[in-house]
Amino acid sequence: MSAPVPSLSERNAATRRPRGRAVVHQRWAHLLFVHWQASPEALARLLPAGLDLDTFEGHAFVGLVPFTVTGTRPRWTPALPFFSRFHEVNLRTYVHRGGRDPGVWFFSLDAGSLLAVQGARAWYRLPYRLARIRLELGSGGTGQEVSCEARRVWPGPLPAACSMRYGPAGAMAPAVPGTLEHFLIERYVLYGASRGRLYRARVHHPRYPVQAATVDGLEETFSRAAGVSLMGPALPSLYAREVEVEVFPPVRL
């Protein structure tokens, strides 16, 4: 018997701030959410035991999300110049545990900071990789167009890379609960795995100020490196300008 899909109330509950203190603060900016459909059966085979694939109206999705991180700091210190800013690209799908705690399973997270990669791999058991990433704003620094190029350095599988240009197009508004957009972007639970054990962490931020996005010249091999097969063309993409983020400590399940 397949696991129950999380209810709308369960999805809304996951967006609320957890109890306790965050251990890390960050700012995420210039986020692009590109998604494709994928075979639910194929994706389910790539998940660790204990996680169920999350679907929307029976469809499964894979997302590619480039963005820049600034202001990274532990709760008890100011931001450190050599650690606080880096770029990231993650490849992900959507999961839950028996109808509860809908969240994200990452096939990979590529970041341009060795300290961030080592720390997240060790503490959060997330599959971070070191990458060379260039993420630049358009002329004048207005943020109306972002150019992104990323290429994985360590560890494999290799090659894994992407390049694209993207920017906002349209009115800014939070995604409406119950819509596909809300299902894809409003995710606050992160799952990791190590040595057969699952780990769960939570983040919290205001709802994304999301806009439609234009995307040009998209090429990527992160999905192929992860053994993920994408179906058809990409869905209409979404852009979010910036959110302030609290990161909470991981819990072993």
Image: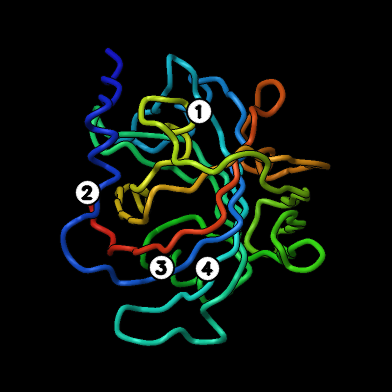
Instruction: Work out whether mark 3 precedes mark 1 in sequence or the reverse, and give the earlier one.
Output: 1
Above or below residue 250? Residue 219 is above
Instruction: Work out whether mark 4 precedes mark 2 in sequence or the reverse, and give the earlier one.
Output: 4
Question: Could you tell me how far apart the alpha carbons at marks 3 and 2 are, in whole angstroms?
Answer: 16 Å
The quarter holding residue 177 reads: top left
Q: Is residue 252 left or right of residue 243?
A: left
Element carrying mark 1: helix
Q: Which residue is mark 2?
A: 253
Element carrying mark 4: helix
Give the residue type that dot 3 points to. Answer: Ala
Question: Could you tell me how far apart the alpha carbons at marks 3 and 1 are, in whole angstroms?
Answer: 25 Å
Question: Could you tell me how far apart the alpha carbons at marks 4 and 3 are, in whole angstroms?
Answer: 9 Å
Q: Is residue 210 left or right of residue 123?
A: right
Q: Which residue is mark 3?
A: 122
Instruction: Work out whether mark 2 precedes mark 1 in sequence or the reverse, and give the earlier one.
Output: 1
**Residue closest to the eye, 46 or 29:** 29
Give the residue type that dot 1 points to. Answer: Leu
Q: Which residue is mark 4?
A: 117
Which circle marks residue 43 in the picture? 1
| Category of crowding for the residue at label 1, using alpha-carbon neighbours closer than 10 angstroms: few (below 14), some (14–19), many (at least 20) | some
